[in-house]
Image: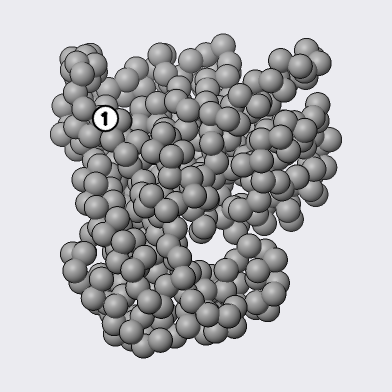
Amino acid sequence: MTRKHEHDKGYHKETRLIHGDFHSPHWDYSDHIVPPISASAAYRLRSAERGAEGFQEFANPEFNRHTHPPIYIYDRLDEPSRSMLEDNMAAAEEGECGVAFSTGMAAIAASLCVLAKSGDTLLAHHTLYGCTYSLLTNWLPRFGVTVKMMNCLDLDALDKALTQEVAAVYFETPSNPILELVDVGAVRAAVDRANAARNPKKRRIFIVVDNTFATPFCQRPITLGADVVVESITKNVGGFGTDMGGMWVGPRLLEPDILLFRKDFGAPLAPKAAWPPLVYGLPTLGLRTGRQMETALALARFLDGHPAVARVVYPGLPSHPQHALAQKQMVDSDGKFAPGILIYFVLKGSPEEARESGRKVMNHLADHALSVTLAVSLGQIRTLIEHPSSMTHAPLPVEAQMAAGIDPGGIRISVGLERVEDIQRDLQDALGTL
Ligand SMILES: *Cc1c(COP(=O)(O)O)cnc(C)c1O
């Protein structure tokens, strides 16, 4: 128990993330400086009775896997390397418990499928990561779940939309790719009003927030009023771009269902994929994010002054339409403003011209730049850039892109750890071709 005890002595979160917490009734690896990767698909059961007991305890609301030694049975149910990451992520997000999935999408699917059943309605903010949008519009309706896309910034509309059928409200803040913010506290207040007016037999409405863009370093949605956080740890938390993973963090009340869902739909995080974010990702999250945010602010200012750029969206710039909200909800655990590492900017010109300019800039960077890489994904040590209009959304005509909220000249940058002068030089060079 000694190391656990040390953890409570007011050390900064950044320091605690480096040292991790490798002791619980689940395991005791507190003498390892680096926690082990376990690799055992199945576990020896010392008796038939112990096997029966293990199945009885798994995902049982009356059994707390955080305070009792578990009976390990099979990797897909529960496993120590993954559990260490779950506990450390729950601590980072300041939630009660964590459950790790093989990808961010698996965590998002689980978070919604345990909350909504046939006949229920899910409300979602209308700008979303593409695969989440597809999950909500292509798949959940097949299971009898009605999905309503709306503008969660419009609080009157939200009040009206929170009807008896609503099971959950889902959003990203900042949203992908346009970095729009949703006020978590305001959504909490609206949901509290709706819950209070509910038929008592109805389950309360839950708020689920995708925290991929901000990461727990820049924002802890549960402390702002969310019930559940989901995120892709493939991105900033993993940080080095080597492995995929997803995390669900939420109340103990929901944990048994999430574990059962993971057992039966089957997308647990592999222990070997849990190890890099545990050993390299979380311990360097603060250092990486601090440096990346400094660079992001400098680049946002540079882009803002560039003649080829119509507008720049970065929550750290006073020109961000929700700068005040950003200052309130995007803060690190020392209370310091932490506006994230993503920048969105739009090139000048008519929709067709802007789209063509974006394509040119991407191709110039792909051919000439060292410090900026043309790629999807984000949150890596390398600066990644993409232009949705000529890449992910290329098949859509510009009018259809605009109707779907995709700006033909919109470009997203995920800032890496390269020297700011070099990134600026590569961007200057590419924008100079326009
Ligand atoms: C990447 C991403 C996801 C999905 O995560 P995967 O690990 O790729 O499955 C979900 N939400 C956001 C905002 C993302 O950027």
From this viewpoint, is residue 135 visible? yes
The residue carrying pointer 1 sits among few (fewer than 14), some (14 to 19) or many (20 or more) residues within 10 Å by Cα, namely few
Q: Nearer the viewer, residue 302 or 84?
A: 302
Query: Which of the image's four quarters has the N terminus?
Result: top left
Numbered disc 1: secondary structure? loop
Say if 212 sits above or below 119 in the image. below
Find residue 259 and report its image quarter: top right
Q: Nearer the viewer, residue 413 or 378?
A: 413
For label 1, the residue is 334
Q: Position of residue 69 (x, y in %)?
A: 39, 17
Residue at the image position 55 percent from the left and 41 percent from the top: 182
Q: Amino acid at mark 1?
A: Asp
Query: Which of the image's four quarters has the C terminus?
Result: bottom left
Residue at the image position 71 percent from the left and 48 percent from the top: 149
Find residue 156 and report its image quarter: top right
Say if 202 sits above or below 359 in the image. above
Q: Position of residue 405 (x, y in %)?
A: 63, 62
Coloration mode: one colour
Find residue 113 and report its image quarter: top right
From this viewpoint, is residue 243 visible? no
Q: Nearer the viewer, residue 291 or 265?
A: 291
Q: Position of residue 269 (x, y in %)?
A: 45, 44
